[in-house]
Image: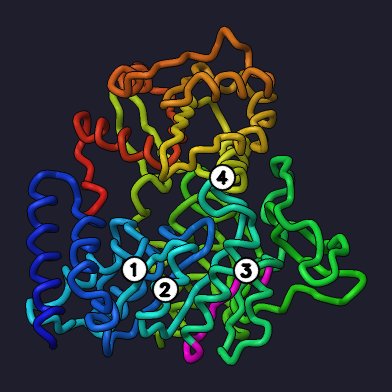
Amino acid sequence: MKLQTRLAVLVCKASGALLRKLGRGGTNLPGRLALKIDKNILGELSRGVKVTVVTGTNGKTTTSRMIEQAFADAGLKYFSNKSGANLLTGIIAVFAQHCTLSGKCPYTHALIECDEAAFRKTSEYLPVVCLVVNNIFRDQLDRYGEITHTLNAIREGITHIPDATLCLNADCSLTASLAEKIPNKVLWFGVNVPIYADTAHELSDAPYCIHCKTEYQYDYMTYGHLGGFRCPKCGYHRREPEVAVTKVVKTGADSSDIVLNMFGRVHEVHVNLPGGYNIYNAAAAAAASHVAGIDEETAVGALGQFECGFGRAEQFTLGKAQARMMLVKNPAGFNQVINLISHDEGCCKLAFLLNDRFADGTDISWIWDVDFETLAAQQVRFPRIFVSGVRADDMALRLKYAGFAADRLEVIRDYDALLTEVGADDTPAFLMPTYTAMFDLRGEIGKHTDVKAFYE
């Protein structure tokens, strides 16, 4: 290993350790410092490691945690970027953290969650053996731009990894198009049936054929633009998945039960998280586990045991109440949380936390495409409705126009005061923060209860 790389590793490790001691995580700055010293450090540190990458708009962190449980149960010697630092610098930092001072990686496998836009660059350095693409939805217009920009960024990244097996969502017409004109082996996963009897009203991010612009027809829909799509003009259509959810037995507030067909073998599966989107994540994880050579029983068992990623349906005891935190960051994801709440039974408190910092997306116009009307129609179930975050007033206005009674919307900007009110009685609560609001809120929750830091 060249001296330049060793120096970069030393600086990365030392700065990361210092930042973690200060309670700041050290997930990106150490990588930036290392990159200034050695431009090819990621390629050097990842040499000889079998890398599984998970990307796509929604579900990266949860899918990664599901795969990680399968890796652990199978006894693989692996590491992952569990902190969620999924840009190039964060990925460099996690590789440096798990390498020796000489730059040698003692692990056989790495599981890397990667930002969709960042994948274009990271794919130049990583020896990817498996790439999972969950889905492609509209997200952070100020950063990603039009949805085709995200698609093209992933498509370009795939050109750098011709030997990798691609695990693609057969139900997403955008994701499925990535399989065209490439040498890679493709393994399809999907959901063969509707997930909910009724779903939130959603605007489709991909209503027209990616090839001929004709409006798609659907044999069934799961959510957003996902489902059994087909173009009546050019014939572009959903592929039959090798890993398929063939029956949704139950979707509850804490988990789901499904029937999963893997290469013709049927498994009854318990998914240790609620929501239709996590059913997709489970299918994606099962596909990636197969590529890693993990037996089906181990892969299926992992789906009922994994720990959720921070902010992704985490549960906390706050005062007298049980609270569940659901990260929301775009219309498709938020609508799935609304589906979950609207299909739940009983009363609960709601807390909406909207920020507009860089990591959230500075353009908050997306909240007008979220179906808050579905919740407003059930507002008798919600004894208290809290609004917080940097853009609390904008969220309150959106909820008012959705049909919530304005005098029932409690704007509480201080997170400590918010948590006190959430825990004032034993009615359960759903906390729905955007990305940076989630970090701030978890920090405050840490003062009230014992939670792991985001980088642990």
Q: Which residues are magenta?
A: 162-171
- Image-based side of 37 in relation to 260, left or right: left
Residues at marks 2 and 4, CA–CA distance in whole angstroms = 22 Å
**Which residue bears the numbered disc 2?**
53
**Which residue type does callout 3 highlight?**
Val
Check the image and report above or below for 264 versus 406: below
Characterize the local packing of mark 2: few (<14), some (14-19) or many (20 or more) Cα atoms within 10 angstroms.
many
Secondary structure state at the residue bearing disc 4 = loop
Secondary structure state at the residue bearing disc 1 = helix
Mark 1 or mark 2, whichever is nearer to me: 2
**Which residue bears the numbered disc 3?**
245
Q: Earlier in the sequence, mark 2 or mark 3?
A: 2
Q: Earlier in the sequence, mark 2 or mark 4?
A: 2
**Which residue bears the numbered disc 1?**
69
Q: Which mark is residue 330?
A: 4
Residue at the (36%, 32%) spot, across then down: 322
Q: Position of residue 171 (x, y in %)?
A: 68, 67
Residues at marks 1 and 4, CA–CA distance in whole angstroms = 27 Å
Secondary structure state at the residue bearing disc 3 = strand
Residue at the (17%, 72%) spot, across then down: 98
The quarter holding residue 235 reads bottom right
Check the image and report above or below for 399 versus 370: above
The quarter holding residue 216 reads bottom right
**Which residue type does callout 1 highlight?**
Gln
Residue 261 visible somewhere in the drawing = no
